């Protein structure tokens, strides 16, 4: 059902719903949910809104309590307190008024003074609101919940058999585990029907940049975008993106707060694509953003053309177990080519791109760009191993598994071996004497040698704290002697 038809249906049913009994309301709700496909809670909100009629609307005019004289006194006291907020000004009002009267700055009659002292903190803010806006040049921002109410909720149960063009959109932060400072974000969009995924890096997560990025994504997808679904991030839920979707005739919906399963498709792609190829490093700056953009330009073809994925066919619960059945794995490109709802021209373009793209060339470019990203994040030089030609890369593939992790963004940092001492050698100057004793008596115990050292130098070896060090040293010496003996006999 079209959005306009749903709005007309709401206008027809709302009056009957508001006048119905509780039992009849339940029946009307059942019919309305079945026809429109709305969530029941959302349907209740739509039908419960009051009917506003400009003719029958009643305007209540209250009695004005605080006249202009009270307002002038409040303004004077507000400026005298260095423009405190209403709650803080209300507390200091009696003392401030008394002090100003005592120094001859104010002289109020009894009636006016009682009105000033009686005014509440909320009334102070209401009286001062236009003055604050004019003085600061800023108007209070509209509450987020009002803007969020303009965007309909779409749950995970409403994605069955959707046509290509219905996207889920989300952000992925490349902060390296530290949210302080500036870092790059990836705006990820995936088509629920085919799994076709596009990613774009942005330097700042700001609503105007989000609109520009959405326009870029709209041109990149091989099919027209009919709807987007986001989370409740303020970068998405704002007037700019709402106006953009309205101008492009895109249905804008959102998930429920704190319900990750409503965006299960995009959450899966965040891990399977973004984290798989970029890892969890911290990326910041224009150079890193350009490098990530170059990487995504290769990933979009490699993943969408040559990476098959599963798609859930059905799910059933048997007791405490959930049984899932999947379709045969297909690439997003294959799903679009086999989908009868996709235009023939689009299918022809996809077939042409599929025949032109070389998966090995794309993977080689991905590996080189990943190596450059790691170098940028760690301020190192790019490894010469990743600068090899495509033929060298092909020769390395059969034995690449021997090196372990092949992705530069996921390779562990090399462990630095310590070849220096952290404290003074306790046997400095006496080790040659210990070696002479060991040459004469190879099987002597370390405790016996320590007793000899304590007898000769009681001040230096007063305690037994060096016994474990001496045992380790003697063990290393005996291991070396044993190896020399074996080599000598062969």
Image (cartoon, rainbow, N blue to C red):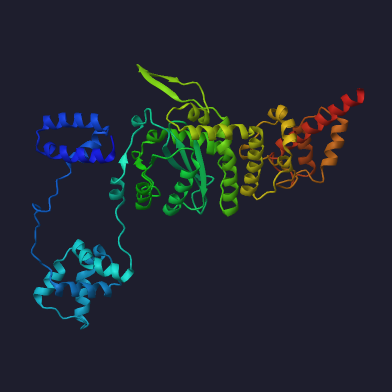
* x and y percentages locating residue 175 in the rendered image: 52, 47
The residue closer to the viewer here, 79 or 149, is 149
Question: Residue 483 appears at what percent x and percent y?
Answer: 84, 27
The residue at the point 31 percent across, 51 percent down is 144
Which residue is most to the front? 345
Which residue is depicted at the point 54% across and 27% down? 308
> Residue sitting at 48 percent across and 53 percent down?
204
Q: Residue at 49% across / 28% down in the picture?
A: 335
Task: Please say whether residue 117 is visible from this viewpoint.
Answer: yes
Drawn side of residue 87 relative to residue 214, left or right: left
Q: In the picture, which quadrant includes the C terminus? A: top right
Q: Is residue 222 above or below residue 148?
A: above
Q: Position of residue 426 (x, y in %)?
A: 75, 44
Residue 385, image quadrant: top right
Residue at the bottom extreme, as displayed? 104
Left or right for 439, reference 411: right
Depth order, front residue of 389/85: 389
Please tell me how many numbered marks the rendered image carries.
0
Q: Quadrant of the N terminus?
A: top left
Rendered position, 329 above or below 89: above
Is 444 on the left-hand or right-hand side of 224? Answer: right
């Amino acid at each position: 059902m079209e959005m306009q038809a749903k709005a007309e249906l709401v206008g027809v049913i709302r009056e009957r719903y508001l006048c119905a009994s509780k039992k009849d309301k339940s029946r009307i709700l059942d019919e309305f949910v079945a026809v429109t496909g709305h969530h029941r809670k959302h349907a209740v909100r739509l039908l419960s809104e009051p009917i506003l009629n400009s003719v029958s609307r009643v305007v209540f005019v209250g009695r004005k309590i605080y006249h202009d004289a009270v307002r002038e006194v409040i303004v004077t006291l507000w400026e005298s307190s260095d423009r405190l907020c209403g709650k803080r000004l209300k507390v200091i009002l009696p003392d401030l008024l008394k002090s100003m009267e005592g120094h001859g700055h104010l002289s109020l009659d009894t009636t006016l003074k009682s009105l000033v002292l009686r005014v509440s903190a909320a009334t102070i803010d209401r009286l001062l609101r236009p003055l604050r806006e004019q003085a600061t040049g800023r108007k209070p921002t509209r509450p987020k919940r009002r803007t969020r109410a303009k965007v309909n909720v779409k749950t995970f149960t409403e994605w069955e058999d959707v046509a290509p063009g219905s996207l889920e959109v989300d952000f992925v932060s490349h902060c390296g585990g530290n949210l302080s400072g500036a870092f790059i974000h990836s705006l990820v969009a995936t088509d629920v029907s085919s799994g076709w995924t596009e990613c774009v890096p942005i330097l700042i997560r700001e609503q105007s940049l989000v609109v520009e990025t959405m326009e870029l994504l709209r041109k990149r997808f091989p099919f027209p975008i009919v709807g987007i679904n986001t989370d409740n991030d303020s970068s998405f839920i704002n007037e700019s993106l709402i106006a953009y979707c309205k101008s492009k005739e895109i249905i804008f919906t959102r998930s429920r707060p704190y319900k990750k399963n409503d965006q299960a498709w995009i959450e899966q792609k965040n891990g399977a694509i973004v984290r798989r190829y970029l890892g969890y490093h911290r990326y910041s700056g224009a150079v890193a953003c350009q490098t990530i953009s170059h990487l995504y330009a290769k990933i979009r073809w490699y993943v969408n053309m040559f990476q098959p994925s599963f798609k859930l066919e059905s799910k059933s619960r048997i007791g405490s177990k959930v049984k899932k059945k999947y379709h045969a794995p297909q690439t997003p490109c294959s799903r679009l080519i086999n989908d009868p709802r996709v235009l023939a021209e689009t299918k022809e373009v996809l077939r042409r791109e599929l025949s032109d793209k070389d998966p090995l060339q794309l993977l080689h470019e991905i590996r080189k760009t990943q190596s450059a990203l790691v170098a940028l994040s760690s301020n190192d030089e790019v490894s010469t191993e990743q600068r090899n030609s495509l033929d060298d890369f092909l020769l390395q593939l059969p034995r690449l598994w021997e090196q372990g992790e092949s992705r530069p963004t996921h390779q562990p940092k090399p462990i630095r071996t310590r070849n220096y001492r952290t404290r003074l050698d306790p046997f400095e100057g006496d080790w040659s004497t210990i070696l002479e004793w060991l040459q004469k008596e190879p099987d002597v115990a370390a405790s016996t040698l320590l007793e000899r050292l304590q007898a000769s130098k009681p001040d230096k070896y007063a305690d037994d704290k060096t016994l474990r060090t001496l045992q380790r040293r003697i063990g290393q010496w005996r291991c070396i002697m044993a190896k020399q003996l074996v080599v000598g006999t062969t």
